[in-house]
Image: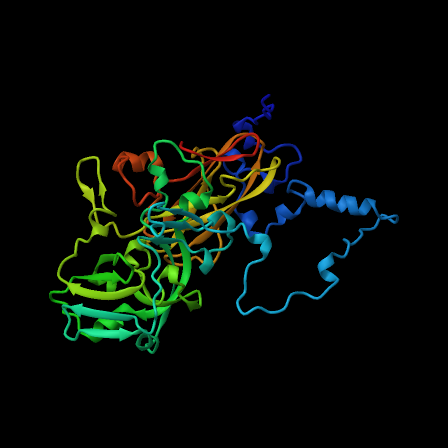
């Protein structure tokens, strides 16, 4: 098969020069054709000025030409305007035209209930993940729990061991927290010696962002009377078939942890912990125990399977990382991203998500030349602690090869590392807490792929 002819690649040194008659707004502010983020903040005026690939202008010209008077003609009346629409349904469903927006499931063939379902980040907009697309990680399937029979016990180093029914918990004053939830194993494809090729959500989609509503765990622990002189940790245990459990420092438990019963306004779905689960804003997902049934206050971590043989990593010097709770700053460009194609040179919006377990995202820098130059992206409001933050930046693609990257800095001053720096510090034996800068290459044909730089 004959190779497609390569398009002419513009010299990168000329890319930053203003060409004759070029509007000042269209002058690149960084290599690779990155434009000023203020163009996004202006409401996309540049994009609306016939700056896309020309499809809208072509359509307008076609309609104008078809009118004998030369005036713009309205589009033909579509069939769905000629008959009544569908009746009400008891529970809303997506349009059938969006049936490709689904989670990608990676499960153990021998034990189908063990595996993950990835959020299709590359198909979503905004920052809130729909309940039906929230990622899931199960160790032995989803238990079908009768809420009337479910109980939550608090015991150990407490004055008054307590047992709560779900109905009991629903009577307590509740709080709501918007926060991301991320599996410690998210993005672990980055440890692979060669970059894996998959959609952005299939590489980085073990993270989602929701509003969780429930009872502050501190309220229940105070009612039980925690022994604060000896009690330093809690063990949280779930009601699934393997009784997943995790140790959590008591200070965190008494801070911002909630026993959640609602997600995005509706009762939590079975795959995400129905009838109740823990939520620990900013901390790794294994601690947010689903189907919560027991909390034991103790003076030491329990050293369970999921914090010794798993979620612990061998380091180059022979030591092991354990209890790496906080999810450090991270970002990923979602448009354009692998599996997408840019049909022609011209203006595009680079868009993606950033987050950090340390709190708010302070800044996201974007590069279109593989990290040689960076410029700050516009952050879409609201920018909230422990939440997804959507970033956007206008980009004028010249039709040549480019490498797109994003880099998050959080409010604690922590900066998302390069892959080289992360691997240099932690080696390639890791599996968890990969948060290096992600690189997407756009080739001269507009195809996007995953690369290391």
Location of residue 197 by image quarter:
top left
Question: How far across and how far down the image is residue 39, in percent?
Answer: 56, 47
Location of residue 77 with respect to 52 vertically, above or below: below
- Image quadrant in which the N terminus is located: top right
Location of residue 150 by image quarter:
bottom left
**Coloring applied to the structure:** rainbow
**Residue at the top extreme of this rendering:** 2
One can see residue 363 in this view: yes
Q: Residue at x 35, y 73 (%)?
A: 174
Drawn side of residue 171 relative to residue 120, left or right? left
Location of residue 451 with respect to 76 vertically, above or below: above
Question: How far across and how far down the image is residue 132, in percent?
Answer: 46, 58
**Residue at the left extreme of this rendering:** 230
- Image quadrant in which the C terminus is located: top left
- 223 or 412, which is in the foreground? 223
Question: How far across and how far down the image is residue 215, in percent?
Answer: 32, 71
Question: How far across and how far down the image is residue 316, in percent?
Answer: 21, 35
One can see residue 257 in this view: no
């Amino acid at each position: 098969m004959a190779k497609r002819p390569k398009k002419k690649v513009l010299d990168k040194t000329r890319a930053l020069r203003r060409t004759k008659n070029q509007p000042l707004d269209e002058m690149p502010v960084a290599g690779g054709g990155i434009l000023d983020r203020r163009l996004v903040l202006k409401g996309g005026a540049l994009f609306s000025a016939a700056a896309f690939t020309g499809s809208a202008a072509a359509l307008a010209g076609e309609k104008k030409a078809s009118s004998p008077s030369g005036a713009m003609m309205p589009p033909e009346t579509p069939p769905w305007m000629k008959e009544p629409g569908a009746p009400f349904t008891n529970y809303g469903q997506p349009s059938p035209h969006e049936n490709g927006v689904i989670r990608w499931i990676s499960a153990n063939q021998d034990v189908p209930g063990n595996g993950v379902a990835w959020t299709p980040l590359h198909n979503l907009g905004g920052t809130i993940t729909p309940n039906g697309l929230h990622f899931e990680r199960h160790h032995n399937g989803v238990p079908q729990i009768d809420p009337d029979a479910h109980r939550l016990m608090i015991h150990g180093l407490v004055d008054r061991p307590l047992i709560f029914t779900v109905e009991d918990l629903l009577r307590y004053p509740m709080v709501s927290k918007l926060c991301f939830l991320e599996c410690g194993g998210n993005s672990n494809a980055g440890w692979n010696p060669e970059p894996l090729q998959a959609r952005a959500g299939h590489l980085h989609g073990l993270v989602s962002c929701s509003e969780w509503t429930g009872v502050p765990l501190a309220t229940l622990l105070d009612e039980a009377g925690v022994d604060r002189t000896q009690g330093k940790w809690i063990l949280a245990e779930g009601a699934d078939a393997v009784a997943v459990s995790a140790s959590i420092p008591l200070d965190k438990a008494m801070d911002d942890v909630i026993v959640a019963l609602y997600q995005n306004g509706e009762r939590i779905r079975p795959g995400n912990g129905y009838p109740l689960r823990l939520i620990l804003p900013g901390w790794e997902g294994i601690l947010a125990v689903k189907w919560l049934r027991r909390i034991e206050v103790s003076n030491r971590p329990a050293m369970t399977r999921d914090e010794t043989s798993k979620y612990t990593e061998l380091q180059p010097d022979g030591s092991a990382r354990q209890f790496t709770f906080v999810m450090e700053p991270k970002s990923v460009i979602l448009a354009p991203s692998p599996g997408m194609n840019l049909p022609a040179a011209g203006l595009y919006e680079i868009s993606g998500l950033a987050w950090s377990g340390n709190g708010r995202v302070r800044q996201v820098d974007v590069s279109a030349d593989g990290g040689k130059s960076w410029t700050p992206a516009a952050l879409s409001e609201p920018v909230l602690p422990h939440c997804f933050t959507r970033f956007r930046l206008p980009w004028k693609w010249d039709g040549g090869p480019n490498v797109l990257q994003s880099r998050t800095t959080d409010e604690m001053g922590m900066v998302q590392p390069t892959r080289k720096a992360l691997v240099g510090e932690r080696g390639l034996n890791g599996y968890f807490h990969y948060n290096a800068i992600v690189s997407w290459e756009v080739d001269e044909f507009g195809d996007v792929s995953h690369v290391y730089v």
